[in-house]
Image (tube, grey):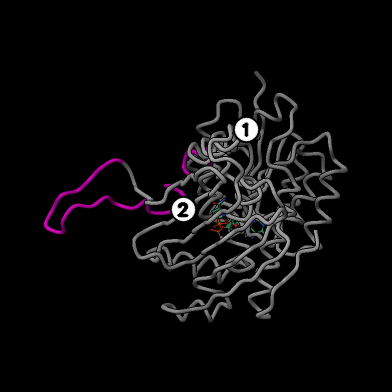
Amino acid sequence: MKKVKIGIVGLGRLGKKHAENIAYKIPNAQLLAVCSIVKEEVEQIQRDWDIKYVYTNFDDMLKNKELDAIFIASPSNFHCEQIAKALEAGFHVFSEKPLGLYVDEVKSVQKIVNEHNNQIFMLGFMRRYDKSYAYAKQKIEEGIIGEPILIRCYGIDPASAMEGFIKFAKSNYSGGLFLDMAIHDFDLARWFLNSEAIKVWAIGGVYAHPVIKEINDIETGAALIQFENNKMGIFVSGRNSAHGYHVETEIIGTNGAIRIGSVPEKNLVEIFDSDGTRKECVGGFLERFEQAYLNEVEEFVDCIIQNRKPSVKVEDGVKSTIIAYACKKSFETGELVNIDQ
Ligand SMILES: NC(=O)c1ccc[n+]([C@@H]2O[C@H](COP(=O)([O-])OP(=O)(O)OC[C@H]3O[C@@H](n4cnc5c(N)ncnc54)[C@H](O)[C@@H]3O)[C@@H](O)[C@H]2O)c1
């Protein structure tokens, strides 16, 4: 079978993992080109992995007509512009989350995606491709908890990753805690509740790590969201989890509840030692969602081969950005924000 030839932009914390998956773990895909503004990054990958084309300029990569698809893992402030350029150059496109950082730019890019309906576009909400989240969704659709009415989400990065986060946040504009982190939970909320947000109130601050204030971000934030049909969402997001990477989700229904990762265990190992008995916590996003990152790219490649649309759509990127941006606005103004869909 013909392989889907992919060029990736962004070879940082996540981009390098995606590149490795495309190069070595997806039989129907070929990593034909890599691009980053950092020359050493592309040269290193070309040497180590024998990649045919390397670029330090995104526009140059788009001139390569051997490519079928462009994979975007650059910083969030470049996503909309790069998605538009890649679609207009005729490629299928995968973009990392968030779709964009402002409501205007995501609405404009949605229009461009819709105008290129014959090309595949997919957004990296990888949690939907995680085995546990997918199973929870299936159970909810089977009706085992009745009608879902409330979602409670925690998404907290490990304090041990602080140095890497500060480096990332200083060199990139991430949009801040709600657009960068909580966006995954906003997407899950829409997915599980099957309902759109109408009102948000968000609060937060910097408590243990003043350096986060220097980069104009929040260390821990909380949001309360009202969804259509009187459904509810409670969200806690942060950068300072002492015990590890804490991603936890609960969906409460009219006839029961489902929890995913309420104790974010690393594996099935239990340790009995001079500290007592314990289970270790999963260390970070690459570890917790390792399989989901692979599954989502497999789905993107399969969609191109089979000419079908992925289940994560540009609309999901638009709606989640609208929620996250409303949270940012609510935090900054101290006001309740109505969401105009
Ligand atoms: N889905 C997830 O769970 C998840 C996890 C982490 C990051 N992300 C997203 O992935 C994206 C990248 O995050 P990261 O942590 O890998 O960032 P990073 O800072 O580690 O890496 C960014 C990469 O992009 C390159 N780059 C920067 N500007 C560029 C430009 N103009 N053109 C080409 N290359 C450029 C950098 O040289 C680097 O290789 C972000 O949008 C982030 O939100 C998603």
Residue at the limit of the structure toward the front, as seen here: 255
Quadrant in the picture for residue 323: bottom right
Percent x, y of residue 316: 71, 48
Q: What residue is rendered at 88% in x and 43% in y?
A: 115
Residue that numbered label 1 is attached to:
299
Rendered image: mark on residue 180: none
State the extent of the magenta-drawn residues as a range: 268-294
- Relative to 239, is 130 above or below? above
Percent x, y of residue 220: 50, 71
Label 2 sits on a secondary structure element that is: strand
Say if disc 2 is inside 8 Å of ligand 1.
Answer: no
Q: Is residue 125 left or right of residue 87?
A: left
Quadrant in the picture for residue 221: bottom right
In this rendering, the label closer to the viewer, 2 or 1:
2
Q: Tag 1: Cα neighbours inside 10 Å, few (<14), some, or many (≥20)?
A: some
Residue 274 shown in magenta: yes
Residue at the limit of the structure toward the right, as seen here: 115
Q: Earlier in the sequence, mark 2 or mark 1?
A: 2
Q: What residue is rendered at 62% in x and 46% in y?
A: 124
Percent x, y of residue 339: 76, 64
Percent x, y of residue 11: 56, 51
Residue that numbered label 2 is attached to:
248
Residue at the limit of the structure toward the left, as seen here: 274
- Between 99 and 183, the one nearer to me in the picture: 183
Label 1 sits on a secondary structure element that is: helix
Quadrant housing the N terminus: top right
- Relative to 181, is 210 above or below? below
Q: Amino acid at mark 1?
A: Glu
- Relative to 213, is 233 above or below? above
